Every structure is written in structure tokens, then in C-alpha cells.
Image: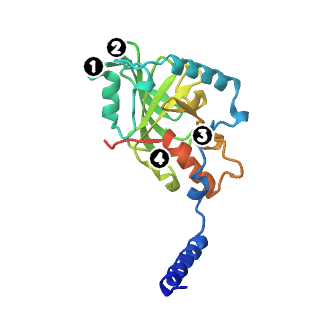
Amino acid sequence: MQPKIRVFLMTLLMVLLIFLKQPITPAQVTQGMSCNQSLFQQSNLTADIQQAQKNFSDLVNSFQEDSNVDIIFEVPIEQKSPAEIEQRITEGNPNYFVLEKTSLTSESDGFFQRYQSTDGEWTKTIKVTTNEANGKSILPYIQIFYEDNYGGVIRIKPYGNPSAPAFLSHLKMPHGTLYFKKDTQGDLSWSNEAFKVYGLMTLPKAPKEVKLPDGITFGTPEAESFLQQCWTFKTHIPLASL
């Protein structure tokens, strides 16, 4: 064997040995897994969620984008500022939303003000959350909700949630969520949220409700990698800063 060929083969062998010794990362484990399959656990598909999914599917099948912005499908929010999102909904009309009443309305976890659109197609709610559901005080944060008349909601946290755990750093940043309600005429409570919406796709509303690939369990790096790939940043969409 010629010396040059021998050196080349020895070099190639060493590279292969180094590569094979590298640990397989969680991202490599989940890289080939598809996000296109349903992420819903069958046990979580209660009758009200199934009905909401049917209502949502009917909306998707009949949806045709037009110049009249009256449904959440027509409002892209990724890397948009809160002002740009409202500009899209109001179509540039600064007097589009009218305050329902001047006083604040108290809730168990904070207070809010509600606005109605002049054409009756949207409801806007600005809420300040001051404590958790269990009554524990937190750093107050602002949420802005835009509800269409079909059960769709855009929820924006323009300053993020300062009380989010350190390991959920993306929640501390400005982000937004699109979701669909169980009862289209119902309130904005967590219990009335059926599922998250990304594009024209439905996603479970909480990470623990996600159906993980076979062989992967919650609490592992592989599970976190899969969630980031298929759920986290589709349900907590980064916004532009104010």
C-alpha cells in the first residue's frame, strides 16, 4: 500500500472513531420525528374538546382569507409587536375599540377592562394578573386578549411573565398564543380553553397533555427536545419587543 493512501485511511479511521465516541444528544434522538401527527393524548379528548375540534375543523374548511379581518386565522403574530397586531385587527382604525365601562372589573387573580369593536367582530380585554389561582402573590403582568366571534382568541403577554421559572426563560420574553374556546360564548378562563392553535393546526393546551413519541417519557431531555421542536414555540410564539 502506498504511503499516501495508508495515511489517508488512518486519518479517516481516526475521524470515524472520534465521531462514534461523541454522545448522542436529545436533539439528535428527536430530529427525525414528525410534528405532523396528532399530539393529543386520546384520554384527554373529552366530549367538549371533541366538539370544539369539530367546530374548529368546520371553520378551517370554510375559511377564505379576505380583506375583512374578523377571525384569528387572519392575524399573524410571530415577531410582530403588540401595536402591529392591533393594527392588523383594527385595519388602522384608531377608534375601532370602545371601552365597555370606565371602571375596572375585579377577578380572583387580578382585574381587567373590556372593549368592544365598533363593528361587533372583536372583543378586546386588557388584564393585569396579580396572583396565582391558589392566591399566591406574583409579580403583576399584563395580558391582552382579542376574541373573534367564532371561539378564537389571541392572547398576548407584551412584557412576558416575570414570575415564570428560570428554566422557562422564553416565557419571560414577549410572547403570544392563539387558542380556541370550548364554549365560544364563554369566558377567558383556563378551564374554557380547549386547545392551542398554530396556523390551521390544533395543539394540546398544556405540555403534559402532549402525546410523546414511543419510548420517550416526560422529564427527560428527549421529551424537552421534542416539545421544543413540536409544541413550545408554536404555542408560545415570540413577539417583537415594544
Is the residue under label 1 in contact with that under label 4 (CB below 8 Å)? Answer: no
Pointer 2 or 4: first along the chain: 2
Q: Amino acid at mark 1?
A: Asn
User: For the point 47% across and 40% down, which residue is it?
Assistant: 130
Pointer 2 or 1: first along the chain: 1
Task: Place residue 71 in its image quadrant.
Answer: top left
Pointer 4 or 1: first along the chain: 1
Residue 50 vertical placement versus 134 (above, below): above
Give the alpha-carbon distance from disc 3 to disc 1, as whole Å: 36 Å
Is the residue under label 1 in contact with that under label 2 (CB below 8 Å)? Answer: yes
Residue 211 vertical placement versus 75 (above, below): below
Q: Which residue is mark 1?
A: 95
> Of helix, strand and loop, which one carries label 2?
loop
In which quadrant is the N terminus drawn? Answer: bottom right
Q: Position of residue 196 (x, y in %)?
A: 54, 33
Is the residue under label 1 in contact with that under label 3 (CB below 8 Å)? Answer: no
Give the alpha-carbon distance from disc 4 to disc 1, as whole Å: 31 Å
Is the residue under label 4 in contact with that under label 2 (CB below 8 Å)? Answer: no
